[in-house]
């Protein structure tokens, strides 16, 4: 597309980082509840099907660390995270000081083990409210690329809102915040979202719909590498 949406998204979330931190980590109990439920939703599946002493878990698009703070309670987990926004990464480190966090564009990464200077691949990759920040083709490219970041039969958690029609890569204002910003957003129907996941090399293990306070339906999905 003609607009540099990566830079647009980076600037948007740099601008929103402080308010995100205040709302998601300090004042909004709803997001704390969701962060806890989401973490359990993914980790319980991982522990049940791949019992081991230690897990490597990576979050893409960690924001200010709302999910990382709940992941921190899992002492059998080594925590890694990536966010395109340097400001978001700063707050994420405040939320979970034992997480290894980098500020990068996930699309630019070929070998994530080199980014963190580790040998082991990841047992689980978390992507909450993340994949819809890419046009469909780039989202598929990213999902296929992270196949190589996972251990054999590794897991991904991925979610987005369920919409009545599919819209690919529209520039939208993010409403409900003091600072007005524009960022790219792709809107998925349930069918289109599942096609994205399956065509990228995963099989869906479990999926549920969750209604947020705003009334949006979120599609929570755990998928496993084929």
Image (cartoon, rainbow, N blue to C red):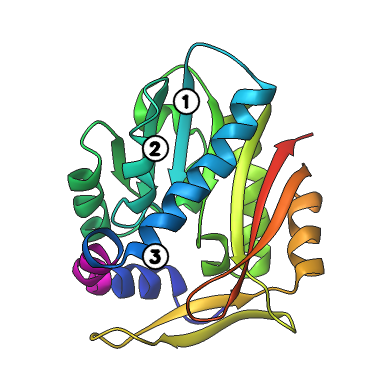
User: Is 78 included in the stretch rendered in magenta?
Assistant: no
Quadrant occupied by the C terminus = top right
Question: Which numbered tag is attached to residue 30?
Answer: 3
Residue identified by numbered label 2:
71
Residue 24 placement (x, y as % from top left)? 30, 63
Question: Which one is closest to the eye, mark 3 or mark 2?
Answer: 3
Residue 152 in view? no
Question: Between marks 1 and 3, how big is the CA–CA gap?
Answer: 27 Å
Residue at 56% from the left image edge and 81% from the top image edge: 215
Residue at 50% from the left image edge and 49% from the top image edge: 37
Viewer-proximal residue among 139 and 203: 203
Q: Main SS type for the magenta part? A: helix
Residue at 29% from the left image edge and 72% from the top image edge: 11
Q: Secondary structure at mark 1?
A: strand
Residue identified by numbered label 1:
56
Q: Secondary structure at mark 3?
A: helix
Badge 3 or badge 2: first in the primary sequence = 3
Residue 74 placement (x, y as % from top left)? 40, 28
């Amino acid at each position: 597309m003609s607009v540099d949406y990566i830079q647009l998204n980076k600037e948007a979330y740099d601008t929103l980082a402080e308010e995100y931190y205040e709302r998601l980590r300090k004042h909004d109990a709803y997001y704390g509840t969701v962060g806890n439920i989401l973490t359990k939703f993914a980790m319980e599946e991982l522990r049940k099907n791949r019992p081991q002493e230690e897990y490597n878990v990576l979050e893409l698009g960690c924001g200010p660390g709302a999910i990382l703070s709940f992941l921190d309670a899992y002492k059998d987990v080594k925590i890694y995270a990536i966010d395109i926004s340097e400001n978001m990464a700063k707050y994420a480190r405040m939320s979970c000081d034992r997480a290894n966090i980098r500020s990068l564009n996930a699309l630019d990464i070929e070998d994530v083990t080199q980014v963190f200077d580790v040998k082991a691949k990841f047992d689980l990759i978390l992507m909450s409210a993340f994949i819809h920040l890419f046009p469909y083709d780039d989202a598929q490219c990213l999902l296929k690329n992270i196949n190589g970041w996972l251990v054999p039969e590794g897991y991904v958690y991925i979610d987005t809102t369920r919409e009545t029609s599919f819209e690919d890569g529209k520039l939208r204002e993010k409403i409900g915040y003091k600072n007005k910003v524009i960022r790219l957003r792709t809107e998925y129907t349930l069918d289109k979202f599942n096609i994205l996941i399956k065509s990228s090399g995963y099989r869906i293990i479990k999926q549920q719909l969750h209604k947020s306070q705003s009334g949006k339906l979120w599609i929570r999905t755990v998928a496993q590498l084929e």
